[in-house]
Image (cartoon, rainbow, N blue to C red):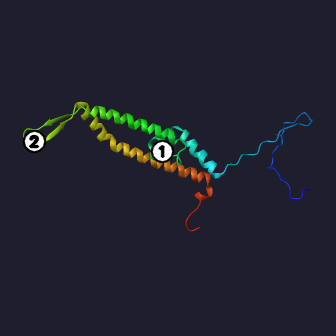
């Protein structure tokens, strides 16, 4: 008998399934591998990575400014490139369209008024309409990002989810 005790595997570990040895002889079976246990940090990171790999997760990554922080999002460098591309292309397009206005000097008041070109006026109205929508989407993306990370934290640390004040 060992001096420090023995290890007892879980019930059924390494045992052949019932009825698998019907020939009457001995069966050389390999023991089943032990389940891999993950640390809470690994469970949390897997949960976050699984979400960001899904279609809704990709939308949240695009809409949440938090996804640009490397410590927050494992895909931060790709998200930074996506945001830079979106901002640069939108900015250059708006600058090209918006530069067509003309300055008109008033002979009555002596002031200058900018007359918008048709494309500039059209784009200006679209931007005026979509700007609040964009801010709302950024807010929703950020809230969704925070919610997912909170859910992943609770999944990785179940004891934290049952904590209540007054216990």
Residue drawn where x is 35% and y is 36% of the image: 91
- Structural crowding at the residue carrying mark 2, measured as other residues with C-alpha within 10 Å and reported as few (<14), some (14–19) or many (≥20): few
Residue 58 visible in rendering: no
The label shown at residue 103 is: none
Residue 11 visible in rendering: yes
Give the image location of residue 130, x and y in percent. 33, 40
Mark 1 secondary-structure assignment: helix
Nearest to the eye among marks 2 and 1: give it. 2
Q: In the current view of this chain or complex, which residue is farthest to the left?
A: 108
Image quadrant of residue 109?
Answer: top left
Q: Is residue 64 above or below residue 158?
A: above
Q: In which quarter of the image is the C terminus?
A: bottom right
The label shown at residue 68 is: 1
Q: Nearer the viewer, residue 94 or 59?
A: 94
Q: For this view, does 61 lie left or right of residue 153?
A: left
Give the image location of residue 13, x and y in percent. 81, 45
Mark 2 secondary-structure assignment: loop
Q: Quadrant of the N terminus?
A: bottom right
Q: For this view, does 162 lie left or right of residue 95?
A: right
Give the image location of residue 97, x and y in percent. 28, 32
Residue drawn where x is 90% and y is 33% of the image: 23
Q: In the current view of this chain or complex, which residue is farthest to the bottom?
A: 166
User: Rounded to the nearest whole Å, what is the CA distance between mark 2 and mark 1?
Assistant: 49 Å
- Structural crowding at the residue carrying mark 1, measured as other residues with C-alpha within 10 Å and reported as few (<14), some (14–19) or many (≥20): many
Q: For this view, does 26 lie left or right of residue 165?
A: right
* Number of disc labels: 2
Image quadrant of residue 124?
Answer: top left
Residue drawn where x is 48% and y is 44% of the image: 68
Q: For mark 2, what is the residue?
A: 110
Give the image location of residue 136, x and y in percent. 38, 46
Q: For this view, does 143 lie left or right of residue 121?
A: right
Image quadrant of residue 49?
Answer: top right
């Amino acid at each position: 008998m060992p001096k420090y005790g023995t290890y007892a595997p879980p019930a059924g570990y390494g045992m052949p399934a019932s009825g698998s040895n019907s020939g009457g002889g001995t069966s050389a079976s390999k023991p089943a591998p032990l389940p891999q246990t993950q640390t809470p940090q690994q469970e949390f990171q897997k949960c976050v990575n699984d979400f960001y790999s899904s279609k809704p997760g990709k939308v949240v990554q695009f809409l949440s400014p938090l996804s640009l922080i490397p410590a927050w999002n494992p895909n931060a460098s790709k998200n930074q490139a996506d945001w830079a591309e979106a901002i640069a292309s939108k900015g250059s397009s708006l600058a090209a369209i918006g530069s067509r206005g003309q300055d008109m000097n008033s002979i009555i008041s002596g002031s200058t008024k900018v007359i918008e070109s048709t494309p500039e006026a059209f784009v200006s109205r679209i931007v005026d309409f979509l700007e609040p929508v964009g801010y709302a989407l950024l807010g929703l993306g950020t809230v969704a990002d925070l919610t997912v990370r909170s859910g992943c934290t609770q999944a990785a640390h179940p004891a934290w989810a049952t904590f209540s004040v007054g216990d």
